[in-house]
Image: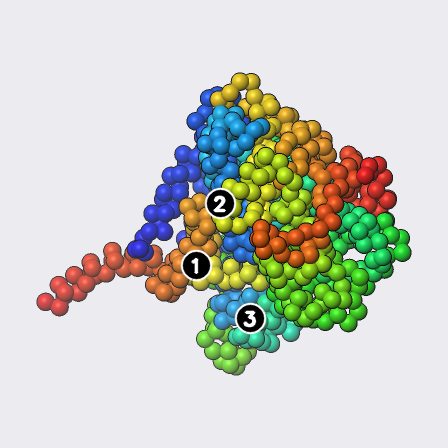
């Protein structure tokens, strides 16, 4: 139980409460951007837990796609606008797909794993742009969601969706945090350090990688559901490799210090994108690229490292002074 | 640039967003100092081949309107005497980014209207949000009939002054039936996404309706932006059809034409490019002689001489040193339609009418455009425009006037190539164009 009083968990809950209260004061476009940031943070969190065991996935877009179409197709073919039904369908599809794919993916490491995940995601993209079921390249529109039989009125529709997105992320973040701090989660780092030794200690690395892949898939599909519900739209580009690349990039720029890092990274990316488009409509991509390059060059450990540097700047001079005193 | 600047950026943005929380309802008819218009075109990526001309035309039109330099009936300054203020946004970056940008335009910049969007996926995704945010939005260039047939079936704030793409396929089929009566076999090369797939389906249906014995050989769908069409050209050359239908646009269209030309494919089949004027813009004399060309409507080299169209073509050439491409015409048309509607709705000069009044005035409106063919807002309860279209055959280059020679230009009335109200485009074609008057 004491694990529930972990500072990270308290921070997540406080943040979610603060955002819930702030919703009324936020203009619509900021609400939407926050939801986009949450949508991208979830699959990026999946990338992060795979990176714990040293595996780089370039195929999180596949589960992003499944989560989004879980919402869209539940509406189109089951006639259910319920948010939780759509979420469940997306998660279920992702779990099934991840278990099957994971069977052979779990044997690969390094670049082979990365390229296979990318290839699988692109196969799905290639099929989706040709199939009417997925709306081909034009995608499918998503109607407003209802919640367990309650359909919020117009003035509450965007607020209720925002609460859903924020608390969904909060729950996913807490669950992921508990997962990473559990014995199994610690083993993931051990796999990264020394795979052979983990095997000698009696654990199945392949099994661990497989389970981790499925967990990451669930996170990816939750993000896709948030993306589809927020944009009220699902299209095959969700499975395109650049989408998956963005998730990897979010982890790169934010670092992997905590389960909140991906949210920090994706929020930063959203804000940067909006700022660049508003001020440089012709060169926004150049600005985006330049900032990313600067981060990679000067903050290779990610933006999260800024906090560490700031802490050092405050703590170290004091410590150094103390040591000098003692040396005398 | 210091490391802390992203944080300053964020602080600034947060401050800006706090300010933006002011309510932004439809602007009341007060004397304003400017009409804020968001223009959304492809400014980067493959679509920029299109967006470049559109943006240039928009800039030119905004300046000319603000100076009151546009010929009648558009000689009032700006819109109804209120000068225009333009904000440009890049349409590249995907659907979810576009929604964010649209919301920013409406809720933070407080634009009075948005004119833009070329990609049908962006139009489809935005239509419900347009209705929700109650901001006049003219989808000036999307061609997909599905926008009002399936996605936004009861449009009000979402309008589309550009005719549907259906017109291009129907017009071309009629042109072939009339000018090339002996053509019996058809192949198609279209980009492998909704636009290309829909166009090929419409063309096949239209051709079959007009020529029940039409035979279809190759239906090739290379990737969007492929750039190398060696295998497609080989397939076409191995079994040439009388006519090869192409709905490519931008760099893809130029690349296919160049590669087909260098391999002499023009000898064994006649190409028909629904956006052929764009190829002529790009390639000039390297265009294969004998190619049937359209201009996504009667645009660019297919325009008709009126005072307005001559003024526009001359000014565009003077400003940018090139004949206005089809996207320039369409962008200008998108702005003129809204202007005409606003001035019709206006009571006196010097103010922009309420958004709802502009939309109401738009319904059923017929207005002059820069290609010389008027547009009538006649379909989907007056939110969808129709116009006549034209096709011709490119036969060579006139070095004296430095213009292409386009022969057999044939004009088809709007009622001849657009479905009547209440009938879905593809069903209308498959049903043998019921209610068409040519």
Q: Residue at x 47, y 70 (%)?
A: A189
Q: Is residue B118 left or right of residue B379?
A: left
Secondary structure of the residue carrying numbered label 2: helix
Residue pointed to by mark 3: A114
Of all chains, the one bearing label 3 is: A
Residue B217: in sight, yes or no?
yes
Of all chains, the one bearing label 2 is: B
Q: Is residue B246 left or right of residue B113?
A: right
Q: Is residue A141 left or right of residue B173?
A: left
Give the Cα distance between marks 1 and 3. Answer: 23 Å
Give the Cα distance between marks 3 and 2. Answer: 53 Å
The spot of residue B70 in percent (x, y) is 52, 33
Crowding at dot 2, Cα within 10 Å, few <14 / some 14-19 / many 20+, comes out as few
Q: Are marks 1 and 3 in contact (CB under 8 Å)?
A: no
Q: Residue at x 59, y 22 (%)?
A: B345
> Closer to the observer: label 3 or label 2?
2
B307 over B352 or under it: above or below: below
Residue pointed to by mark 2: B318
3 and 2 marks on the same chain: no
Q: Residue at x 77, y 72 (%)?
A: B238
Q: Earlier in the sequence, mark 1 or mark 3?
A: 3
Give the Cα distance between marks 1 and 2. Answer: 36 Å
Crowding at dot 1, Cα within 10 Å, few <14 / some 14-19 / many 20+, comes out as few
Crowding at dot 3, Cα within 10 Å, few <14 / some 14-19 / many 20+, comes out as some
Residue pointed to by mark 1: A289
Image quadrant in which you'd find residue B385: top right
The spot of residue A73 in percent (x, y) is 71, 50
Q: Residue furthest right?
A: B213
């Amino acid at each position: 139980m004491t694990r529930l009083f972990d500072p990270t968990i308290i921070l997540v809950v406080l943040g979610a409460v603060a955002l819930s209260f702030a919703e009324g004061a936020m203009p619509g476009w900021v609400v939407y951007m926050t939801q986009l940031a949450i949508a991208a943070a979830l699959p990026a969190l999946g990338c992060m837990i795979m990176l714990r065991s040293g595996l780089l996935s370039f195929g999180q877009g596949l589960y992003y796609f499944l989560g989004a179409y879980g919402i869209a197709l539940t509406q189109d073919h089951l006639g259910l606008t319920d948010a939780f039904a759509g979420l469940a369908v997306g998660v279920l599809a992702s779990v099934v797909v991840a278990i099957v794919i994971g069977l052979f993916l779990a044997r690969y490491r390094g670049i082979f794993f990365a390229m296979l995940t990318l290839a699988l995601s692109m196969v799905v993209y290639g099929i989706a742009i040709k199939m009417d079921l997925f709306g081909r390249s034009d995608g499918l529109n998503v109607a407003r969601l209802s919640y367990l039989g309650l359909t919020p009125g117009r003035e509450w529709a965007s607020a209720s969706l925002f609460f859903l997105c924020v608390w969904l992320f909060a729950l996913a973040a807490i669950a992921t945090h508990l997962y990473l701090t559990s014995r199994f989660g610690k083993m993931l780092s051990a796999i990264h350090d020394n795979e052979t030794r983990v095997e000698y200690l009696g654990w199945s690395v392949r099994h661990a990688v497989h389970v981790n892949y499925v967990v990451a898939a669930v996170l990816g599909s939750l993000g896709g559901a948030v993306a589809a519900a927020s944009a009220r739209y699902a299209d095959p580009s969700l499975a395109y490799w650049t989408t998956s690349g963005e998730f990897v990039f979010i982890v790169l720029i934010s670092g992997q210090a905590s389960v909140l890092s991906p949210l920090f990274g994706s929020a930063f990316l959203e804000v940067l994108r909006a700022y660049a488009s508003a001020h440089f409509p012709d060169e926004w991509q150049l600005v985006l690229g330049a900032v990313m390059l600067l981060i990679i060059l000067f903050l290779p450990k990610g933006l999260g490292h800024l906090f560490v540097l700031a802490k050092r700047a405050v703590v170290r001079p004091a410590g150094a002074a103390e040591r000098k005193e003692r040396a005398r | 640039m210091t490391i802390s600047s992203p944080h300053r950026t964020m602080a600034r943005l947060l401050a800006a967003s706090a300010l933006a929380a002011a309510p932004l309802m439809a602007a009341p008819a007060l004397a304003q100092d400017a009409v804020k218009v968001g223009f959304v075109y492809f400014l980067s990526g493959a679509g920029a081949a299109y967006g470049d001309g559109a943006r240039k035309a928009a800039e030119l039109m905004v300046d000319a309107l603000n100076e009151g330099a546009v010929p009648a009936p558009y000689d009032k300054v700006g819109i109804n005497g209120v000068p225009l203020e333009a904000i440009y946004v890049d349409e590249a970056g995907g659907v979810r980014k576009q929604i964010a940008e649209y919301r920013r335009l409406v809720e933070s910049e407080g634009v009075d209207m948005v004119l833009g969007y070329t990609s049908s996926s962006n139009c489809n995704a935005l239509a419900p949000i347009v209705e929700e945010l109650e901001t006049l939005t003219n989808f000036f260039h999307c061609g997909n009939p599905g926008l009002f047939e399936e996605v936004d079936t009861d449009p009000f704030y979402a309008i589309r002054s550009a005719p549907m793409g259906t017109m291009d396929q129907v017009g071309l089929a009629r042109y072939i039936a009339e000018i090339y009566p002996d053509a019996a076999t058809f192949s198609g090369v279209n980009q492998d996404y909704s636009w290309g797939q829909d166009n090929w389906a419409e063309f096949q249906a239209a051709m079959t309706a007009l020529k029940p014995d039409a035979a279809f050989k190759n239906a090739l769908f290379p990737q969007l932006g492929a750039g190398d069409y060696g295998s497609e050209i080989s397939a076409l050359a191995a079994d040439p059809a009388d006519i090869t239908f192409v709905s490519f646009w931008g760099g893809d269209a130029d690349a296919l034409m160049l590669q087909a030309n260098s391999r002499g494919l023009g000898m064994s089949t006649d190409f028909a490019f629904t956006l052929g004027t764009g190829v002529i813009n790009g390639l000039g004399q390297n265009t294969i002689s004998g190619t049937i060309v359209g201009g996504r409507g009667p645009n660019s080299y297919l325009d008709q001489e009126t005072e307005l169209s001559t003024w526009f073509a001359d000014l565009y050439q003077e400003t940018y040193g090139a004949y206005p491409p089809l996207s320039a015409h369409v962008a200008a048309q998108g702005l003129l339609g809204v202007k005409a509607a606003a001035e019709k709705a206006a009571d006196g000069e010097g103010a922009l009418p309420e958004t709802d009044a502009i939309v109401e005035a738009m319904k059923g409106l017929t207005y002059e455009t820069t290609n010389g063919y008027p547009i009538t807002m006649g379909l989907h309860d007056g939110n969808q425009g129709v116009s006549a279209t034209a096709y011709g055959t490119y036969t060579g280059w006139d070095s004296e006037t430095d213009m292409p020679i386009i022969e057999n230009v044939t004009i088809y009335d709007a009622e001849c190539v657009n479905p009547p109200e209440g009938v879905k485009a593809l069903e209308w074609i498959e049903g043998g164009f019921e209610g068409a008057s040519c």
